[in-house]
């Protein structure tokens, strides 16, 4: 007999739709193919095998269909398949950040334009931002195949066609250059930067994660991460701190064109260096927003070069 657990995940944002356990009956009714991956765990509670990449992908597909009205979502094999509850949290916290310039009222408007750096093949942040708050996005990536898949997702969901545009970054050493033109004005930028400094480091991390999710996989010398990931999604020279450092220095060239630059920072030990660089480029406002999903703790670092309230309002 299956048990029902409606306990709240209090570490997720208060507006996050996924604070309670997944309603698999509801999800399966919208996405019947999920049924094949649902099992009962030792506590008698329905779940899926999170060490199985296909199970995670189909769960995501069901969540997007059920809660965000996204149809025919898919990603190529071995591309990053993100956990939707955590990605939704980033969107909600950006909404809170923007509300500070609007008498603490949430911006639910297509006048908000976001720039998603490294959107991957999944397009998840623009999808969530548009579905939840009706924001528009420019989504970028250096991977041509990823951009092509994002285009397929948009074409399969007509409501996204006018809300999300795609742009490939053709020079991998740059982040904003070639993307932000002199005429552009973005309300915010967002990014989930590559976490690791090398392919070897990424593979070791993958092994640990798969072992934790499924101890039987411990001796697998070539494990597949449950959430997938191509090289550019998982690692870059210099790792997370190298990528964020580049992002901050480039952001200083677009001080009047973006209200808030933001990025996820997974490694707490990187914060002190990030703050020093932000001071060096004369950011006038810096905020750190703590995030937590399950046992993982992360944070959003946001910075702005615009401190005048009237100028801030021009971005909405």
Image (cartoon, rainbow, N blue to C red):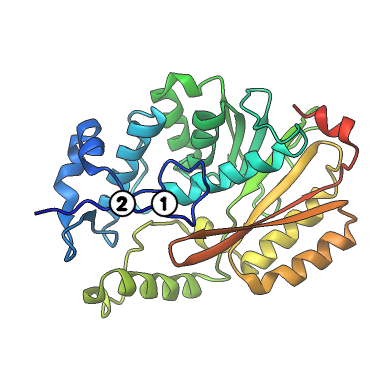
Relative to 307, 93 lies left or right = left
Q: Position of residue 236 (x, y in %)?
A: 59, 64
Q: Residue furthest left?
A: 1
Q: Position of residue 86 (x, y in %)?
A: 48, 51
Helix or strand or loop: what does disc 2 sit on?
A: helix
Relative to 145, 22 lies left or right = left
Whether residue 169 is visible: no
> Which residue sits at x=75%, y=39%?
100
Q: Residues within 10 Å of mark 2 (few under 14, many from 20)?
A: many
Res 115 label: none
> Which residue sits at x=38%, y=27%?
69
On the image, which quarter does residue 247 sit in?
Answer: bottom right
The reply to whether the C-beta atoms of the residues labelled 2 and 1 are less than 8 Å apart is yes
Up the image or down, 170 lies above or below 68; here it is: below
Q: Earlier in the sequence, mark 2 or mark 1?
A: 2
Helix or strand or loop: what does disc 1 sit on?
A: loop
Relative to 49, 142 lies left or right = right
Q: Residues within 10 Å of mark 1 (few under 14, many from 20)?
A: some
Whether residue 79 is visible: yes
> Which residue sits at x=43%, y=46%?
84
Up the image or down, 271 lies above or below 72; here it is: below
Up the image or down, 277 lies above or below 125; here it is: below
> Which residue is under mark 1?
83
Q: Work out whether residue 131 or residue 159 is closer to the camera in this orientation and state it.
A: 131
> Which residue sits at x=62%, y=65%?
240
Q: Residue furthest bottom?
A: 219
Q: Work out whether residue 311 or residue 261 is closer to the camera in this orientation and state it.
A: 311
> Which residue is under mark 2?
56
Image quarter (top left, top right, bottom left or bottom right) of the N terminus: bottom left
Q: Position of residue 313 (x, y in %)?
A: 81, 29
């Amino acid at each position: 007999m299956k048990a029902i657990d409606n306990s709240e995940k209090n570490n997720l944002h208060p507006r996050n739709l996924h604070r309670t356990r997944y309603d698999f009956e509801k999800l399966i009714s919208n996405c019947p193919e999920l049924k094949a991956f649902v099992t009962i765990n030792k506590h008698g509670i329905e779940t899926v095998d999170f060490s199985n990449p296909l199970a995670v992908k189909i769960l995501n597909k069901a969540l997007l269909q059920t809660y965000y009205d996204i149809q025919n979502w898919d990603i190529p094999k071995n591309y990053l398949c993100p956990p939707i509850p955590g990605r939704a949290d980033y969107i909600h916290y950006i909404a809170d950040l923007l509300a500070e310039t609007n008498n603490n009222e949430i911006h639910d408007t297509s006048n908000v334009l976001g720039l998603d750096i490294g959107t991957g093949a999944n397009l998840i942040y623009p999808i969530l931002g548009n579905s939840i708050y009706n924001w528009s996005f420019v989504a970028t990536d250096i991977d041509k195949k990823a951009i092509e898949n994002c285009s397929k997702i948009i074409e399969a969901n007509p409501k996204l066609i006018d809300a999300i545009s795609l742009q490939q970054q053709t020079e991998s050493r740059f982040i904003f250059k070639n993307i932000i033109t002199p005429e552009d004005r973005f309300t915010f930028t967002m990014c989930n930067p590559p976490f690791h400094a090398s392919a070897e480091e990424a593979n070791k991390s993958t092994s640990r994660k798969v072992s934790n999710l499924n101890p039987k996989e411990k001796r697998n010398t070539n494990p597949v991460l449950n959430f997938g990931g191509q090289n550019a999604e998982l690692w870059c020279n210099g790792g997370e701190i190298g990528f964020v450092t580049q992002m901050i220095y480039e952001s200083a060239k677009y001080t009047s064109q973006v209200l808030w630059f933001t990025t996820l920072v997974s490694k707490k030990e990187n914060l002190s260096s990030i703050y020093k660089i932000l001071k060096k480029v004369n950011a006038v406002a810096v905020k750190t927003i703590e995030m937590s999903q399950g046992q993982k703790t992360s944070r959003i670092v946001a910075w702005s070069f615009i401190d005048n309230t009237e100028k801030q309002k021009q971005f909405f």
